[in-house]
Amino acid sequence: MLHTAFSMAGSGSPYIRYGYDGDLDRQTPLGPEGKGEATIDLIGLKAGKTVEWQVVAEVGKKLEEGPVRTLEVPPPPTDLAPLQLDVYDDSQVESGPFHVLTNVTERDDSFVVIIDRDGDYVWYARSRNPSVNIVHVELSADRKSVLWGEFDRLEETDFGGMFRLTLDGRTETFTPMPDAHHDIAELPDGQLAYLAFDIRSMEITDLDIGPQTVQASSIRTVAEGTADGRSYETLFAYADDYTVPPWFVCSHMSPNENLFGYFQWDHANSLMVDPVTDDLVVMLRNFDAITWIDPDTGAMNRQVGGLHGTPIADPATPFDHGHMTQLWDGGFMVFDNVLHGDGPSAMVEYTLDPATDVATEVWRYEDPEGLVYPVLSDADKLPGGNYLGTWYVEGRINEVTPSGDVVWQVETTDGGKFARASALGDLHHL
């Protein structure tokens, strides 16, 4: 980020022209009209590149132009995975400015990054704790900050919580979230909601083995910036509030299927806010289900998929241990990991009938190499109709047309992984 400060002799509206390789083909939005001292931030500069920039002011019908200056933008950290742009079909990609907000998981650290259309890093922040698992990252509701969750990937220490860092890098806050895992959501009232582990001794109804240590999930809410991590409220606990007590959902619930030696019951992995009802929407991976939780009463309003929910329209196309980050009025996207089938994993779009809660598959794009992705990954629908896929195992993000053509693709070249991703437009117009 480049912070500029300058003085205008006359009253005008300033902006910055900038670009690379001698071509000043980009510009920031017009600043407010004024006279004298002014400042503009230039966000989203390519790491490791030389940028040329120039202050310009519209003064009446004239343009006042400052000198063209250059800045050597520092390269990305050496332990941040190098990127390779494999595919870029300018005739079929989404039109207009395009950036991807995602997280890169490395061997030791994780990073939150923004990547531009050329496959270059233009913004990054290193995890604030060593050996963490960043699997949640999103643009804030006011579109001025990046939010991400940090959780101990081995669950040996409980430093979990959410970081908020403004895009200009000036302000950072941390909200502790004990027992947090996987996902966080901003609520319309300014509170934060997060998924938390709820580990207790419980009977598994269809196994005659007595009480067992079972990990369920709960939804907690907390005021952002609260220093006391225990000042949360539990909105919904699946161990207490779900329609039935724990049962043996599938083989992935078994203690030998995870690192922790207990039964993982629901494996909640995605938390969103319904854009119409404000319900908290949770994907339960082991249930193969999505639940809607009332943010005021804590009641479970509906469930799509799974043993106790409204079935998918075609029994042959239910999602299988998936992940999701996107839903809209009348539909949603799922990355279908397909852990119980023959594979491959796929991006899938469903419509959702509001009268019957029946979900119907309307589009599917399978991994072209036939791979099964056992963890993470993501799928989003873009405004223009294309799709954005995040393929964790391969360290790949791509843009795919409705007809299944890959028109943009970036990959890491050293084994770094992308967990989830979302598309942004021009960083100066967010």
Image: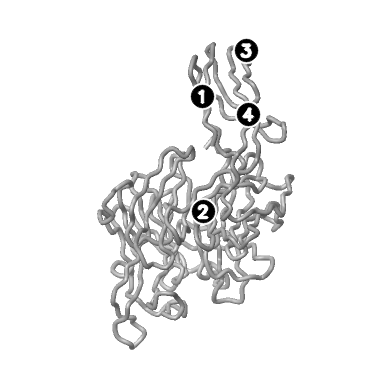
Mark 3 or mark 1: which is in front? 1
Q: CA distance from mark 2 to mark 4?
A: 28 Å
Report the disc number at residue 53. Answer: 4
Report the disc number at residue 111. Answer: 2
> Circle 4 sits in a helix, a strand or a loop, which is it?
strand
Mark 1 belongs to which amino acid? Answer: Ala
Image quadrant assignment for residue 245: bottom left
Question: Which residue occupies 63% across, 29% down?
Answer: 53
Mark 3 or mark 4: which is in front? 4
Mark 3 or mark 2: which is in front? 2
For mark 3, what is the residue?
A: 61
Q: Residues within 10 Å of mark 2 (few under 14, many from 20)?
A: many
Q: CA distance from mark 2 to mark 1?
A: 30 Å
Q: CA distance from mark 3 to mark 1?
A: 23 Å
| Residue 383, visible in the rendered structure | no
Query: Residue 412, position in %: x, y?
Result: 63, 57
Q: Residues within 10 Å of mark 1 (few under 14, many from 20)?
A: few
Question: Which residue occupies 33% across, 53% down?
Answer: 176
